[in-house]
């Protein structure tokens, strides 16, 4: 597997497997993560997987006697990953996410439709028929960055981010879709809301979703939404 190494600060290295967000990059990242976990090198403090990269934070004191700690870590990473291969496709967990679209739950649905010359119903049909994969969790606790959305409903981020986005809001930014697990500022175009809790602080792991999960969105009514919430809002 081909990858490049570049420094990040004085004790981190970015392992990059490509420039494109796709399934191949996801499998390469997954393979690197598996090797790091299996090898568990003593000099590794933490690793952070993303779309096309894995950032590795290392213990600088382990290389204090080296002329170039960065160079020494690069050598160890290349040795550790020298025969790693792209992870094979496996049966992925499918998570079904109900969404009530539009209205107070999705105030930007009309904008997304107008932006793409579609009707609201067409946007919903396209969004619910996507083949989605969770590429990573980040930004906020349990926030899934989801790939696989059709470019037919792509939309730019808001010029002025909202100061408060309701928890569980479903949004679009560029060619990505995602769900805000908690109330937070943000600039994504909001098209709906799910009754499901994505951030589960009392559970292990504390997230409903994980990288590699497959996502299926499906439409529900506002009455169904309120019924599933059980007055929790």
Image (cartoon, rainbow, N blue to C red):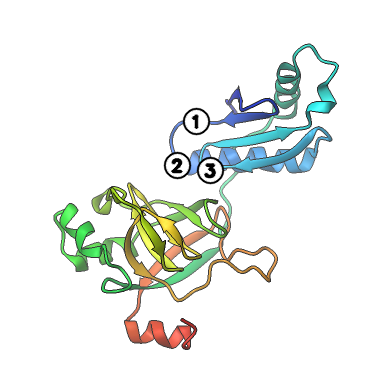
* Mark 2, secondary structure of its residue: loop
- Residue at screen point 42% across, 65% down: 216
Dot 3 and dot 1 residues touching (CB under 8 Å) = no
> Dot 2: few (<14), some (14–19), or many (≥20) neighbours within 10 Å?
some
- As rendered, which of 24 and 116 lies closer to the eye? 116
Q: x and y percent of residue 233 in the render?
A: 46, 81
* Mark 3, secondary structure of its residue: helix
Cα–Cα gap, marks 2 and 3: 6 Å
Dot 2 and dot 1 residues touching (CB under 8 Å) = yes
Q: x and y percent of residue 187 in the render?
A: 36, 53
Q: x and y percent of residue 20 in the render?
A: 43, 35
- As rendered, which of 24 and 185 lies closer to the eye? 185
Question: Which mark identifies residue 22?
Answer: 2
Which residue bears the numbered disc 3?
A: 26
- Residue at screen point 16% across, 64% down: 119
Cα–Cα gap, marks 3 and 1: 10 Å
Seen in the image, is 216 located left or right of residue 159?
right
Cα–Cα gap, marks 2 and 1: 9 Å
Q: Quadrant of the N terminus?
A: top right
Seen in the image, is 220 located left or right of residue 214?
left
Seen in the image, is 43 located left or right of residue 34?
right
> Dot 3: few (<14), some (14–19), or many (≥20) neighbours within 10 Å?
many
> Dot 1: few (<14), some (14–19), or many (≥20) neighbours within 10 Å?
some
- Residue at screen point 70% across, 34% down: 57
Which residue bears the numbered disc 1?
A: 18
Mark found first going from the N terminus, 3 or 1: 1
- Residue at screen point 50% across, 39% down: 24
Dot 2 and dot 3 residues touching (CB under 8 Å) = yes
* Mark 1, secondary structure of its residue: loop
Q: Which image quadrant for residue 105?
A: bottom left
């Amino acid at each position: 597997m081909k990858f490049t190494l570049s420094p990040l600060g004085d004790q981190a290295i970015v392992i990059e497997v490509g420039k494109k967000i796709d399934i191949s990059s996801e499998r390469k990242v997954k393979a690197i993560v598996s090797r790091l976990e299996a090898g568990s090198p003593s000099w590794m403090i933490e690793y952070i997987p993303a779309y096309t990269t894995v950032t590795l934070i290392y213990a600088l004191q382990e290389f204090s006697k080296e002329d170039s700690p960065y160079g020494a870590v690069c050598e160890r990473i290349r040795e550790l990953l020298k025969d790693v291969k792209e992870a094979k496709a496996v049966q992925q967990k499918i998570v079904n996410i109900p969404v009530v679209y539009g209205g107070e739950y999705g105030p930007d649905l009309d904008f997304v439709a107008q932006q793409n010359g579609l009707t609201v119903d067409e946007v919903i049909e396209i969004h619910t028929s996507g083949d989605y994969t969770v590429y990573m969790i980040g930004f906020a606790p349990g926030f899934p960055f989801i790939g696989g959305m059709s470019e037919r409903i792509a939309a730019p981020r808001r010029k002025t981010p909202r100061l408060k986005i309701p928890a569980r809001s479903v949004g679009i930014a560029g060619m990505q879709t995602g769900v805000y697990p908690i109330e937070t500022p943000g600039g994504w175009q909001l098209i709906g809301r799910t009754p499901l809790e994505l951030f589960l602080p009392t559970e292990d792991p504390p997230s409903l979703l994980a990288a590699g999960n497959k996502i299926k969105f499906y439409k529900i009514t506002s009455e169904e939404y309120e019924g599933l919430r059980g007055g929790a809002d």
